[in-house]
Image: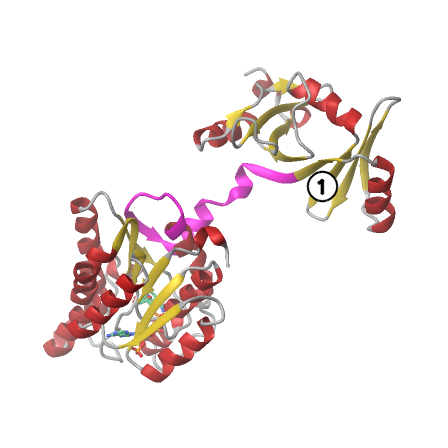
Amino acid sequence: MSSSSVARTALITGASRGLGLALAHALGQLGWSLIIDARDAAALDAAGAQLAPLTNVIAIAGDVNDPAHRAALAEAAHKLGGLDALVNNASTLGASPRPNLLDYALNDLEAVYRTNVIAPLALIQTLQSTFKSEVRIINVTSDAGVEPYAGWGGYGSSKAALEHLSAILAAEKPEWRVYWIDPGDMRTQMHQEAFPGEDISDRPTPDVSVPGFLALLVGDFPSGRFAARAVTADSEPSTMVQGLRLALTVSDFERATALYRDGLRLPVLDQWISDNSKGILFGAGEATLEIFDEGQAAEVDQIEVGHRSAGPVRVALIVDDLDTASTAMLEKGAVAVSQPILTPWHDRNQRLAFEPHNDVQVTLSHDEQTTPEAEVNT
Ligand SMILES: NC(=O)c1ccc[n+]([C@@H]2O[C@H](COP(=O)([O-])OP(=O)(O)OC[C@H]3O[C@@H](n4cnc5c(N)ncnc54)[C@H](OP(=O)(O)O)[C@@H]3O)[C@@H](O)[C@H]2O)c1
């Protein structure tokens, strides 16, 4: 359990199976405390038993439509010191096979709206006194709430109502993060109910949608509608960073080199040997491991910073565009240790740190030889 996330708590409704359980697993692994519910007590207990080795979990069986159950959830949230996140995930498809609107029994339609629209708002109302200042509220919706698919009039229109309710809540409470998220098609019990008798084995499991939820729960996104799988696709980090190089300065260069070259048999990609300094670059799977002696570290610091600067560990990120990457880091609170310089080995490098005087410096590095000329001159 990570100490930074140990104090966080999420309430996820409908977490005995499907998406709710997959998200609970992921948050449990990150050390979040969890409150989970579902109507079937046996299935919920089984889910709670799976999660218990990961984290602190309170499982309360009940129906989100029941005010007494919602009050019990609020009590648990108070007991855990308040909520960092509420995930309104429990939902009903309604009648299956799905009737067309002209045949929809109105009692059934009301029941769908109660579970999919009224209950999520009721939970937000009941739980609001437990929300921490940075709270994230996630209402799980569907593309059926946006696209007018024939045969989806009950469930689809309820999700459309939930979407609009979420958007208005976001406008009324700008200090909260309110997300309404389409998880995409998933191979779950609800999906099977939507397509009775059909083979749904080509649909992905809910795990595929979970990273998008995590990104929203721990990230800095504004309130709004998201498609879970697009969140992570959009924030694909490889567009800015192409590689990680760890640059180590060691007191015994020969021993360290032998350990990696002869012991681990890492391939030597490059080396720099002079009377005063030695450096060697190893391939290390998808990363590279660079070992410097004190002389080489001093030379590199002199070129990049103007004086001996880095500690025994320095992180080097090989980037596509130095200025974009540098600006991105500076905007997030990094400190420039030096301005960008062109090195004798034809990289354009800049040294940054997380705080002034921090030992672990970061070199952003771009190989100018691979840059089109027009870019070099800018
Ligand atoms: N699967 C898809 O392809 C898909 C696509 C788009 C959106 N979604 C949305 O994704 C969310 C999760 O769906 P899923 O596919 O994971 O469904 P699921 O596998 O059927 O799981 C639904 C969960 O909600 C619980 N639940 C249902 N009604 C409840 C109620 N009244 N009170 C408390 N708990 C209740 C269920 O347990 P009990 O039955 O024991 O109560 C279960 O734990 C839903 O909001 C759904 O609309 C799903």
Q: Which residues are magenta?
A: 217-244
x and y, in percent, of residue 51 in the image: 45, 71
x and y, in percent, of residue 218 in the image: 40, 49
For this rendering, which residue is in front, 153 or 288?
288
For this rendering, which residue is in front, 240 or 302?
302
x and y, in percent, of residue 222 in the image: 31, 43
Figure colour scheme: secondary structure
Viewport quadrant of the C terminus? top right
Q: Give the residue at x 16% y 75%.
A: 111
In the displayed structure, does residue 350 sit left or right of residue 299? left
Looking at the rendered structure, the kind of residue marked 1 is Thr
In the displayed structure, does residue 219 sit left or right of residue 246? left
4 magenta-colored: no
- Quarter of the image where one finds residue 81: bottom left
User: What residue is disc 1 on?
Assistant: 288
242 magenta-colored: yes
Q: Give the residue at x 37% y 52%.
A: 217
For this rendering, which residue is in front, 92 or 290?
290
* Kind of element beneath mark 1: strand
